[in-house]
Amino acid sequence: MDFELTAIPAFRDNYIWLLSQGRAAVVVDPGDATPVRDALSRRQLRLEAILITHHHSDHAGGAAELAAEHHCPVYGPANEQIPAVTHPLREGAECLVPALGAAHFDILDIPGHTAGHIAYCGHNIVFCGDTLFSAGCGRLFEGTAAQMAASLGKLASLDEQTQVCCGHEYTQANLRFAAAVEPGNPRILAYAEEVKALREAGKPTLPSRIGLERQVNPFLRCGEPTVAAAASRRAAGPVADPVEVFAVIRSWKDNFT
C-alpha cells in the first residue's frame, strides 16, 4: 500500500502518528486534538479512524474530541477502560479501515507498560505506543517483567523491515543507556551518531526498524551474553535467564542518569 506516514509532535516529546492515502487519514494515539486538527486542515485530509494503543492520557486524551468532530470510529484495547473507544480490540482481531485503501492491521496484546496495551501491525508498520521505543522500552507501570519481556519478544519477531512507530522521542537518552549496557557494541555507537545528527537538524529519529532494534536495543537483547554479563555486574551476582536479565536492566534504566 502506498501510504504517507507522518510523525506529528505533541506535548514535550510525544509523537502522534498520521497515516494517509489521498485525502483519507488515520491517526494513532492522539493525546492532544489540536496538532492533529492543524495537520488535517493544512493537508486537507479527512479523518477516517482513530487508533489507540493504551489508556494514558498523552495517547488517548484527544480521541473523543476528534471523533465527535469527524464522526469516525475509535479503535482501542478491549482490556482497558477508554471511554472514547467504539471498537475494542484484542490479539487475534483485525482493524480494517476501508476508506484508507483497505488498510488493515493485525492486533497484538503487548501488556507490561499498561495491563491492556495493544499494538497495530500491518503494511510493514507497527504502532507500538509505549511498549517498544527505539533503543529502549516503556516502564512497568501495570505489568510484570515477564509480561513485558514476552511482549517485546512478539515485537522483535516481526519482519526486520517493519517500521517501529512508537510514542516518544526518547532515542538519544535510550542510546546512552544502551551504551552503558554494551559499551563494545559498534552498532550502538554508530546509531548514536546518526541520531545526534538528526536531532541537531530538528528531525525525528523515528520510525526505527525492527532489524535495527535487534542490534541496538538492550531490552531485545536479553539473551545475548554481553547483556547478561552487564546484568550480572549490576546485580552483583550471576543472572542468566533472559526474563531476569530484563528485570535487572529495566530496574537499572529506571535509575539511570
Image (cartoon, rainbow, N blue to C red):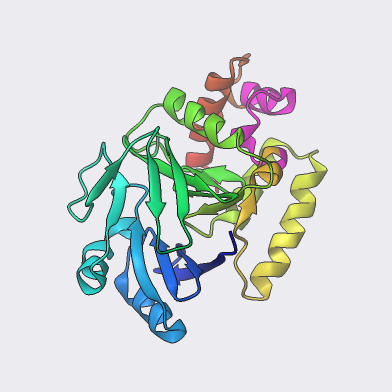
Confirm whether the magenta stretch covers residue 221: yes
Q: In the figure, is residue 184 to the left or right of 122?
A: right
Image location of residue 103, percent across then percent down:
47, 55
In the rendered image, the residue lying farthest to the left is 83
Which sits in the foreground, 14 or 94? Answer: 94
Which sits in the foreground, 169 or 42? Answer: 42
Report the residue at 62% width, 46% height from top: 135
Which sits in the foreground, 44 or 84? Answer: 44
Q: Can residue 203 be seen in this view?
A: yes
Report the residue at 46% width, 47% height from top: 105
Magenta region's main secondary structure?
A: helix
Magenta-tinted stretch:
215-233
Report the residue at 46% width, 56% height from top: 102
Vertical placement of 92 versus 243: above or below? below
Q: Can residue 56 be seen in this view?
A: no
Q: In the figure, is residue 85 to the left or right of 35?
A: left
Image location of residue 6, percent across then percent down:
53, 68
Image location of residue 123, percent across then percent down:
57, 51
Report the residue at 29% width, 57% height from top: 60
